[in-house]
Image (tube, rainbow, N blue to C red):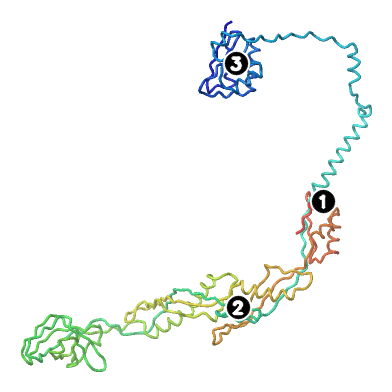
Amino acid sequence: MKTQIIALESHDDLISVRDRMSWAKSPRILLVWPKYEKVTLRPVDLRVLQQHARYLGADLGLVTRRADVRRDAIGFGIPVFASTAAAQRDLWPARRSMRRRGPRADHPNLRMMKAGAEVREAAWKSSPAARIGFFSMGVLAALAVAALFVPRAAIKLTPVSQRQNVILPLAASKSNSSVSISGGVPAKSISVTVTESQSAQVTSQSSVPQTKATGIARFKNLTQNGVSIPAGTVVYSVGQSTVRFVTMNDTHLVGTANAFVDVPVTAEQAGAIGNVPVNSIQAIEGSVGLSTSVTNPEPTTGGTDLVTTAPSEDDRKRVYEALLPILQMQAEKEIKASIGAKDLLLTNTLQMGQIVNESYDPPAGRAGSLLTLTMTVGYSAQYVAASDLTRLAQTVLNAAVPAGYVPDANSLSFSEIGSPALDQSGTTHFELQVERTLVHQINSEQANALVRGLSPNAAVQRLQSNLPLASAPQIDLSPSWWPRLPLIPFRIEVK
């Protein structure tokens, strides 16, 4: 008998094998397992393939050496062969005949049994009155649920309150490491550097140097050796004021005793102060003075001053004194901006430190009708942290809270009384007024229980008569047209 041989591959599965079996046109289909590859067919897949082969009108057989596949196939009644040749040579087991059963005769009392099995609806259920009644009950139930869960109320209560205040004598020092109930608080240091300018009009008249004086310096040799006098050699006058001059040229003095040479000189500073009389220049600076002497055979001339509007020493002092308060105010402002908003600055500890820069415009000796002083100065101060003040204030105030009241944490405020004083040990003594608001405590659950199911007006009256309120309560209903407050507690919010 003709046999269709299908060689399985490792990638074959139930679907692909069924498709390949569907193309078979022979009464026998033989599935051949590969020797060295594994086919992923489960036992249930073999059963499905067997049923598919019967559907095609063919017998199914296997060729495999795998013990598990052979065991499953024998269990399903599928013949297993050692090779394809053996499958074609040996006999296959006969298929079981599938005998069709004929139609069964109807039971004679089938109609009566069917009628008896039917469940008939009660007559009252089909009554219009009953249906309207049940519908009305459903509507009422829905309305009852809506009445419980739809309305929402928000109640705002303003409890009575009172102010609590106390005056605390404090002593702030850097030596304090913690807050003391006796009033000792730690003082912290802070430093800033500020730069400010101040200008003032100048009306005083001053002599401003204009040109430098010039003249002749006569050098006399005191030795028998030649002497070199380089340009820039300094000679100066002796007397009440010293005027310095410098030589303009390199000069050589011959090596003969009492030999002399005249050298042109110019005053170092401009102004009429450089005009000195004859024989005023008598000193030499440097090693040249060991071998020579100097004098001026003629007065020096040409130094002039210009009388004009120029800042005087009094003007500079006046601008300086006007700038100091501005610097201090700016330093205090920057320190307050650097510390916390509620930290307390001890203004009596604000001190001026090192002057980093001080410049006048115009500088000394220059003319000008507007004098501007720019200064950069360091300042230092001490302050008390708000956390330390709060800790001390709460400790003192909490000891005097009336029964039934609680403090409002956001209402605590501080203010200095009088001016702080600094003692010899560096401790700042001052008085601090502390204030806060105490609010009467209200049980929100009690307020909730008082108003459930009441109308807004009745709820307001009950709340006012049973709770310590400073003003009438505010009740917001949602929806606004709802006549009463909810009955369910979690639908009422008390603030």
- Residue drawn where x is 55% and y is 81% of the image: 348
Residue corresponding to mark 1: 488
Alpha carbon separation for disc pair 3 and 2: 101 Å
**Pointers 3 and 2 in contact (C-beta within 8 Å):** no
- Residue type (three-letter) at the residue carrying disc 2: Val
Q: What is the number of the mark on residue 80?
A: 3
- Residue drawn where x is 93% and y is 31% of the image: 129
Q: Residues within 10 Å of mark 1 (few under 14, many from 20)?
A: some
- Residue type (three-letter) at the residue carrying disc 3: Val
Residue 37 point in image, percent of width and height? 52, 23
Q: Earlier in the sequence, mark 2 or mark 1?
A: 2
Residue 119 point in image, percent of width and height? 89, 24
Quarter residue 474 falls in: bottom right
Residue corresponding to mark 2: 185
Horizontal arrangement in the rendering, residue 212 relative to residue 315 (left or right): left
Residue 239 point in image, percent of width and height? 24, 94
- Camera-nearest residue between 19 and 213: 19
- Camera-nearest residue between 161 and 266: 161
